Amino acid sequence: MLKTHNCGDLRAQDAGRKVMLAGWLHKRRDHGGLIFLDLRDRSGVAQIVVGPEVADARQVADAARSEYVLAVRGTVRLRPEGMTNLNMPTGQVEVAAEYVQVLNTSRPPAIPVDGDGRNVSEDMRLKYRYLDLRRERLQHSLMLRHNVCKFIRDYLSARGFIEIETPVLIKSTPEGARDYVVPSRVHPGKFYALPQSPQQLKQLLMVAGFERYFQIARCFRDEDLRGDRQPEFTQLDLEMSFVERDDVLAVVEGLLTEMMPVVAPHKRILSPFPRMSYTEAMERFGTDKPDLRFGLELVDLTDALGQSEFQVFRAAQESGGRIKAVRAPGCADYTRRELDELAAIAKGQGAKGLVTLAFAADGIKGPAVKFLCESDLNEIKRRVEAREGDLVCIVADQPGVVGKSLSALRLTWRDRLNLAPADLIAFGWVVDFPMFEWNTEQKRWDAAHHPFTMPKREQLGRLETDPASVLSDAYDLVCNGYELASGSIRIHDREIQRRIFRVLNYPDDEIQARFGHMLEAFEYGAPPHGGMAPGIDRLVMLLADESSIREVIAFPKTASATDLMTDAPSVVDARQLAELHLRIAE
């Protein structure tokens, strides 16, 4: 080995010890008689002192520059009195160098590697990702990711789960997003698909009798990207046989509850995890992935204001819409510009407008006050629990628009007013989702979760006659405003699966072509089973206090799904295209 110790491991008890260190030159300071080198490796930074008595080492240190790779041999000693650095784990000691060697030189870094990188453009950070990854911030995030995955493997293995890898080249089947497809050279005109998830494969492993499976799985989806999405991502995939919904939830809740103090001891969690139905989540928060770290729940005013003289409210009620409000504490003094910003947020979610009422010391203010009688205003105040200094925002529209608009405002106030404790990880369960969603463009039903989800057994009788009323045995794990995991009890009966495909309007020949292998497998004694798939990227993002999963992935893509470091995607030459029997359309 070129080093006997890691730079960041040296402590006061190592004083007097001969060491060999190797790493990158983080900083160099020439104080005339002494040259100080901050040597950095993955573990941290050690201060090296090169004195005039070691002429050869001093000559090398004098020529060394930022990010040179150095080897240093010397003796650990306590820093002089008054020179300790309590902000560094190694701040009590330094290494008196006897020998310094340049293992490799470096060009001046294209981007700075100290600091957190937030003042560097993301495009530059991604282009020079191998430099960006030298930052303590990113190295900490990737170590955290490693610890999360290691804990998962140890925890599930101790509970009878078997880790099994599933293929990356599979058949294209509908999973909710567009597939990435791979042309076959051996089979002209045919394509593999990269898996959006190992959904069918893990179900087939249950048919195969493994009973408890897991995998840290790579998944691929060709969809529009944002801060918490990437074209390739990682999830914990797990499946269990002979279980009901609460059995699956108990395993995942136990895993996360025991994981948190080990990998993120600085975080608190709500325990046990709160549980609510999809309908309750939409009523209370306007979203099926609520942030449970703070209140400001939506308040329904439809029955109180639906017959109001205010035409906006009356029209919403008469058209089957809803009237809901949310309270912003201490925001009654918002300026006209700030109120316009709130209205723009609501309109961005489809709302026609936003009604604002400011509860000031000298009365209730707002353009809508003149249209509301005193009893209306009193009822709003009572239900919303408005106090002096509060601002109440009301949206009257179709239920989906109302929910999205007020949910967006609720999150706006979360961030502006710092309502969510930074150290709290608020997991929660959302259960009993609708089985189907109506596709207005194609005039057909789509699976709200995926087509292998089991409907509530007691509602199977109205599967074909009233699909809108059927609930699924699906469940989501939400956390701090994100969907962290999705799962369900699966269909294991061939006839029920065929009925679902028919509700989804798949012709029999397409059912056979796409899913024949699944239906046939169900004829060979498929056990009842269910599972879940928590997202590793999002979990680590939240634990690392980051706002984008790109910060916890070693080599992520940009928001336009490009790799600036390797210049992917890229063109391929005509010979490769010919081998794949492809031609680029003009």
Image (cartoon, helix red, strand yellow):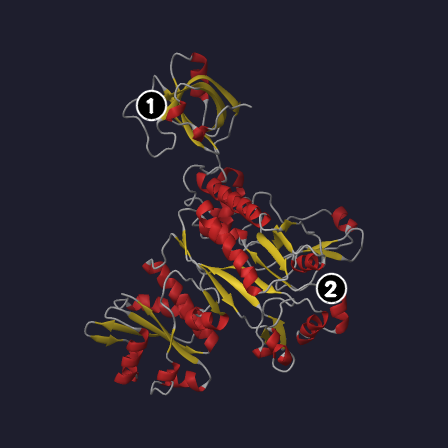
Residue 429 or 144: which is nearer the viewer? 429
- How far is the residue under mark 1 from the one under mark 2? 71 Å
Q: Identify residue type, mark 2.
A: Gly
Query: SS of the residue at dot 1?
Result: loop
Kindly identify the residue that appears in the image at 29 percent across and 70 percent down.
Answer: 391
Image-based side of 68 in relation to 334, left or right: right
Labels in figure, total:
2
Residue 277 or 365: which is nearer the viewer? 277
Tag nearer the camera, 1 or 2 = 2
Image-based side of 122 in relation to 496, left or right: left
Residue that numbered label 1 is attached to:
79
Residue that numbered label 2 is attached to:
525
User: Does the image show residue 83?
Assistant: yes
The crowding category of the residue bearing disc 2, from other C-alpha atoms within 10 Å (few below 14, some 14 to 19, many at least 20), is few
User: Does the image show residue 486?
Assistant: no
Across and down, in percent, residue 346 comes to 41, 70
Indicate which disc, 1 or 2, sits on the residue closer to the N terminus: 1
Across and down, in percent, residue 299 comes to 37, 74
Residue 375 sits above or below residue 259 on the image: below
The crowding category of the residue bearing disc 1, from other C-alpha atoms within 10 Å (few below 14, some 14 to 19, many at least 20), is some
